[in-house]
Image: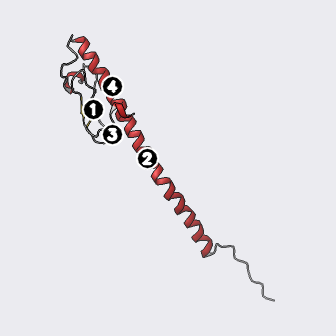
Amino acid sequence: MLKMKKRNAFTLVEILIVALIIGMLVTIAIPNFVRARENARAKTCAQNLRVIEVAKDQYLMDNNLPRTATIASIDISGPNSYIKILPVCPSSGTYDTGRGDQEALCSIGPPHSLSGN
């Protein structure tokens, strides 16, 4: 009598089902990762704008300037200044310090401005 060995292997249908399930999970997960990354960038940008605002206020007070004075980035940043290195927008935007009575803005705009946090 000839005995046949039983093979323990996956069938093609089982492999395709597993691949389908993995594909569905990836389809659900990727948009969530992208959304989380954008939320982190927006929060970082808003925090950078807060740092610039505090530096602007300190600069105006230390130099007895009116709130309507225009403040350049170079006035508040530098090795011996209020901010050692001016923050960089994580979304590749640029920051505008503006006047003392205006909030600092990001060139990307809302949702990155202070009003959009």
Q: Tell me if residue 77 comes above or below residue 107 in the rendering.
A: above
Q: Are marks 4 and 3 in contact (CB under 8 Å)?
A: no
Category of crowding for the residue at label 4, using alpha-carbon neighbours closer than 10 angstroms: few (below 14), some (14–19), many (at least 20): some
The quarter of the displayed image where residue 113 is located: top left
Foreground of the two, 50 or 78: 50
For marks 1 and 2, the one nearer the N-term is: 2
In the image: residue 100, left or right of residue 1: left
Judging by the rendered image, the residue that carries numbered circle 1 is 105
Name the outermost residue toward the bottom. Answer: 1
SS under mark 4:
helix
Q: Nearer the viewer, residue 89 or 84?
A: 89
Q: In which quadrant is the C terminus drawn?
A: top left
- Disc nearer the start of the sequence (2/4): 2
Residue ID for mark 2: 35
Residue sticking out furthest to the right: 1
Q: Residues within 10 Å of mark 2 (few under 14, many from 20)?
A: few
Q: Position of residue 63 (x, y in %)?
A: 21, 12
Type of residue at label 1?
Leu
Tell me which numbered mark, 4 or 3, is placed earlier along the sequence. 4
In this view, the mark in front (1 or 3): 1
Check contact, mark 2 vs mark 4: CB within 8 A. no
Q: Type of residue at label 2?
A: Arg
Mark 4 and mark 1 lie on one chain; the one further toward the N terminus is 4
**Residue at image x 27%, y 28%?**
104
Of callouts 3 and 2, the N-terminal one: 2
Relative to 98, 115 lies left or right: right
Which numbered circle lies on residue 90?
A: 3
Indicate the secondary structure of the residue bearing disc 2.
helix
- Residue beneath the point at 34% across and 30% down: 114
Measure how far apart labels 4 and 1 are at the Cα level.
12 Å
Q: Nearer the viewer, mark 2 or mark 4?
A: 2
